[in-house]
Amino acid sequence: MNKQGKDKITGGIFLIGIAALGVSGLWWPGILVVLGITSLVSGLLEGRLWKSASGAFWLIGLALIFYLNWPWWLLIALTGIGLIIGAHRDRSSGREVPQWAQSLSAWGERMQEHTQAEKEKRKNDDL
């Protein structure tokens, strides 16, 4: 899938999220959840799940803390969890990547391969 197609998908998800916020009236901290979900989808489509998962984790975690009025020290715990997850995000570091993350990454890679194959097929059909 080309960049324009990816941008359309993530833009559509963002707009649907904004519409859901309008209906529910949960603008704050709902906007953090919408941005987090959009970041996750964008990362999946671009094959960089680990980088986008970190940002999405923070945004959605902060939204939960604000929405549920949890105490400030949970921000410190969230930081610790983020550091632990971040230690597993770099495959080249030689550290073990959780099985669920390997499955998601493999799925994203298969989607990219399928998209490339479709692109090549359309290119050959046009000739």
Image (cartoon, grey):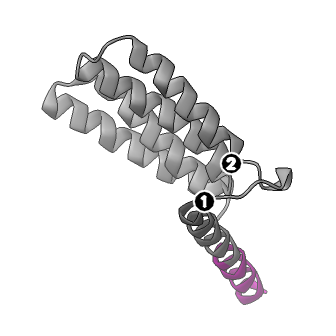
Magenta region includes residue 85: no
**Residue 3 vertical position relative to residue 80 in the rendered view, above or below:** below
Instruction: Specify the principal SS of the magenta part.
Output: helix
Q: What stretch is highlighted in magenta?
A: 114-127
Q: Seen in the image, is 39 located left or right of residue 92?
A: left
Residue 80, numbered circle:
none
- For mark 2, does the 10 Å Cα neighbourhood hold few (<14), some (14 to 19), or many (20 or more) residues? some
Residue type pointed to by label 1: Pro
Spot occupied by residue 119 in the image (x, y as percentages of width and height): 70, 76
Residue type pointed to by label 2: His
Q: Seen in the image, is 127 located left or right of residue 98?
A: right
In the current view of this chain or complex, which residue is farthest to the top? 72
Secondary element under disc 2, as helix, strand or loop, is loop
The tag earlier along the polypeptide, 1 or 2, is: 2
Spot occupied by residue 39 in the image (x, y as percentages of width and height): 53, 41
Spot occupied by residue 103 in the image (x, y as percentages of width and height): 57, 69
Hey, which quadrant is residue 113 in on the image? bottom right
Give the residue number, with chain letter if any, for mark 2: 88
Spot occupied by residue 21 in the image (x, y as percentages of width and height): 24, 31
Q: Determine the CA span between mark 1 and mark 2.
A: 7 Å
Magenta region includes residue 117: yes
84 vs 15, nearest the viewer: 84
Secondary element under disc 1, as helix, strand or loop, is loop
Pointers 1 and 2 in contact (C-beta within 8 Å): yes
Residue 98, numbered circle:
1
Tell me which residue sits at (64%, 75%) in the image. Answer: 110
Tell me which residue sits at (28%, 18%) in the image. Answer: 70
**Residue 60 vertical position relative to residue 62 in the rendered view, above or below:** below
